[in-house]
Structure formats: C-alpha cells, structure tokens
C-alpha cells in the first residue's frame, strides 16, 4: 500500500475516474480517496483530474467536507449532453 501511495505521489498527473459511483462512501473508499487527494494536494501540489456523474453540490453529501474541499478547490468543468455509452 505504501509503495502504491508513493507511486501516486510521484506521478506528474493523476486521474480519479468515476468518483461518486455507488452513492455511499464505505470507510475504506473514503480513507483511500482522502489519502490519494492528500498526496496530490499537499506540498508540492500536483495536478489531478476527478471525473464522475455526481454534481459538485452532491460530493460532500456522498463523502464529506474534506473530500469536497480537496476536489472542488480547483477548476470545475461541467460537461452536459446525451450519454455516449452504447445502449443495449
């Protein structure tokens, strides 16, 4: 685990995909997300991209204020439009 966190901290950019999937934050997921965000947001700050289908206003309700602060402290871009996923 420690090795993985060091690798994440060294990367020039980190992408967290599908944040908010499941709508409930289990303790492990919450702790993991906070640790990854801390590694990116603490000195030296390194860029990260977070994607998800959750409106920014709901991040705090799903996780907590610590996660919302870290995710929403930068530039937030909201993309809207029809799904591009293939329909069954």
Image: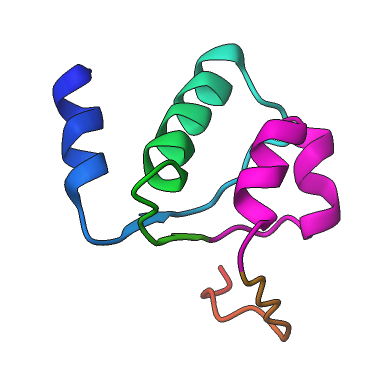
Q: With respect to residue 15, does 32 lie above or below? A: above
What's the magenta bit mostly, secondary-structure-wise? helix
Residue at the image position 61 percent from the left and 51 percent from the top: 71
Residue 12 position (above or below residue 81): above
Is any atom of residue 35 visible in this view? Answer: yes
Is residue 20 something that shows in the picture?
A: no
User: In this image, 71 relative to 28: left or right?
Assistant: right
Q: Position of residue 73 (x, y in %)?
A: 66, 57
Reply above or below: 46 against 9: below
Residue 82 shown left or right of residue 45 in the figure: right
Find residue 57 and report its horizontal and vertical position in percent: 85, 54
Q: Quadrant of the C terminus?
A: bottom right
Specify whether residue 72 is painted magenta: yes
Residue shown at the point (53%, 52%) measured from the top left:
18
Residue 83 lies in quadrant = bottom right
How many dots with numbers? 0
Q: Which residues are magenta?
A: 51-74
- Residue at coordinates 75% horizontally, 45% vertically from top-left? 59
């Amino acid at each position: 685990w420690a090795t993985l966190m060091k690798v994440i901290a060294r990367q020039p950019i980190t992408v967290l995909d599908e944040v908010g999937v499941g709508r409930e934050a289990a303790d492990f997921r919450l702790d993991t997300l906070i640790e990854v965000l801390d590694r990116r947001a603490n000195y030296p700050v390194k860029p990260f991209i977070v994607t998800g289908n959750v409106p920014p206003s709901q991040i705090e309700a799903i996780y907590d204020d610590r996660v919302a602060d870290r995710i929403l402290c930068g530039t937030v871009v909201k993309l809207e439009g029809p799904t591009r996923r293939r329909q069954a």
